[in-house]
Image (cartoon, rainbow, N blue to C red):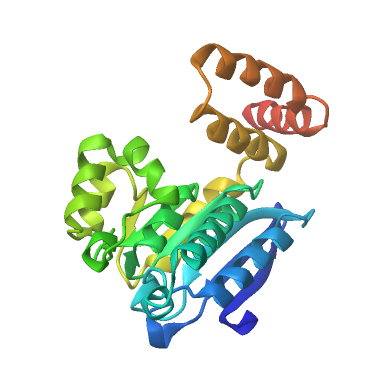
Amino acid sequence: MAEFVTTVRSETDRGAVYTVTIDNQKKLNTLNSDILAALKSSFEDLKTKEDLAVVILTGAGEKSFIGGANIYEMATLNPDTARTFITNLHHVCSAIRDIPAPVIARINGLCLGAGMEIAAICDLVVAIDSAEFAMPEVRVGIPSVIEAAVLPQILGASLARDLVMTARPMFAKEAHRAGLVHRLATPENLDEVTQTVVDDLLAGGRNALRLQKALCNAWENLPTDKAIQLGIDHFSDAYTGPEPQEMMNAFINRKR
């Protein structure tokens, strides 16, 4: 199943951009246990790349980002195997979230269940305006769980409750207004809009972005006083390398 997850590296003068593609098009890029294992392995490998600057995660084809977890496999689960399956899905989400560099979700179609959870834990989301988001689990007898827990933080408790209880679709424009989608695109300019986000990220310092991502993740769970202190620590940490001086001097010289 490793062939269903591919990683392509593109080199820039500010580091490498890696594109991870889930290619299970015949089944709308749904995730079974083998694909979950391959996806987790891919992101764990990326975490070790010294040249890593940005990651783009997408689904192959033009219909689906991730169509959810594989219902045929889930239909065979029992309480023990269900716990293993959903824990493995959580481990994939954790592997994506733990990437030190920014991760962009490139949403090219359906983004359902596990797909919406994965999009929610990416740093930035670019979606075509016809993309469809939904948490349909209750319609097949299971609750929305694991990283669905971040949806109230992003969407607000009321909208998150609506989506996971009614399983209704939320299209990209509503998802954009609600804060899940950061950039809207047409199918024709999805790559262009995604590249604009990549360029914006590459304009920042690579180490600064890593520190910023670590802070963004920590802010979700820390009380304000501890989050402020961690920010002071990370500000100091930024000066352990040459990046601030180099980038500030370049800015000063440019202004001159």
Q: Quadrant of residue 63?
A: bottom left
Question: In this view, which residue lies farthest toward the bottom?
Answer: 26
Residue 222 versus residue 200 in the image, above or below? above
Number of numbered discs overlaid on the protein picture: 0
Which residue is found at the position 35% from the left and 44% from the top?
151
203 or 171: nearer the eye?
Answer: 171
Q: Quadrant of residue 133?
A: bottom left
Residue 35 drawn at (x, y percent)? 56, 75
Which residue is found at the position 50% from the left and 80% from the top?
23
Residue 226 versus residue 90 in the image, above or below? above
Residue 136 drawn at (x, y percent)? 26, 62
Q: Quadrant of residue 207?
A: top right
Q: Is residue 89 left or right of residue 202?
A: left
Residue 164 drawn at (x, y percent)? 25, 51
48 or 53: nearer the eye?
Answer: 48
Residue 67 versus residue 54 in the image, above or below? below
Which residue is found at the position 50% from the left and 55% from the top?
104
200 or 104: nearer the eye?
Answer: 104
Looking at the rendered image, the quarter that the N terminus falls into is bottom right
Looking at the rendered image, the quarter that the C terminus falls into is top right
Q: Is residue 90 left or right of residue 40?
A: left
Q: Is residue 144 left or right of residue 213?
A: left
Which residue is found at the position 54% from the left and 73% from the top?
33
Question: In this view, which residue lies farthest toward the top?
Answer: 225
Residue 237 drawn at (x, y percent)? 76, 25
